[in-house]
Amino acid sequence: KLIKKAVEANKNSYSPYSNYAVGAAIIAIYTKDGGFPCGSCLQVITEFSPNIEVIIASDLNTYKVYKCSELLPNPFILK
């Protein structure tokens, strides 16, 4: 269900600099080639929950699950 929402969100991606469309729905992230979100996106996710599970999908049946801390091992953290 989350992957379907991420596919829908991908259609509305705002990516004027990279032209690399990414759709996300809470923790499911969809790109056409199963690529990862940029460091800025991962930083924002990390600020909410560094150990949240993130689903990276290239279609509804092809995906992998990662902890956000695996994708961005050294985030900026305010102390």
Image: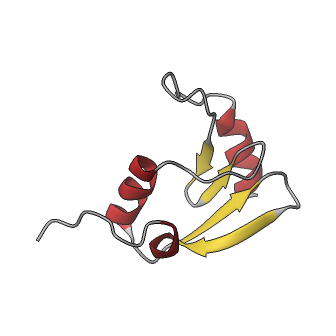
Q: Quarter of the image containing the N terminus?
A: bottom right
Residue closest to the far top: 16
Image quarter of residue 7: top right
Image quarter of residue 51: bottom left
Image quarter of residue 28: bottom right
Q: Is residue 72 above or below residue 23?
A: below
Residue 64: x, y in percent? 73, 69
Q: Quarter of the image containing the C terminus?
A: bottom left
Give the mark count. 0
Residue 39: x, y in percent? 43, 52
Q: How is colour applied across the structure in the image?
A: secondary structure
Residue 66: x, y in percent? 61, 73
> 62 and 9: which one is in front?
62
Q: Which residue appears at 44% of the width and 49% of the height?
A: 41
Q: Is residue 68 left or right of residue 48?
A: right
> 34 and 23: which one is in front?
34
Residue closest to the far left: 79
Q: Which residue appears at 38% of the width and 64% of the height?
A: 46
Q: Which residue appears at 85% of the width and 55% of the height?
A: 60
Q: Is residue 77 above or below residue 18?
A: below
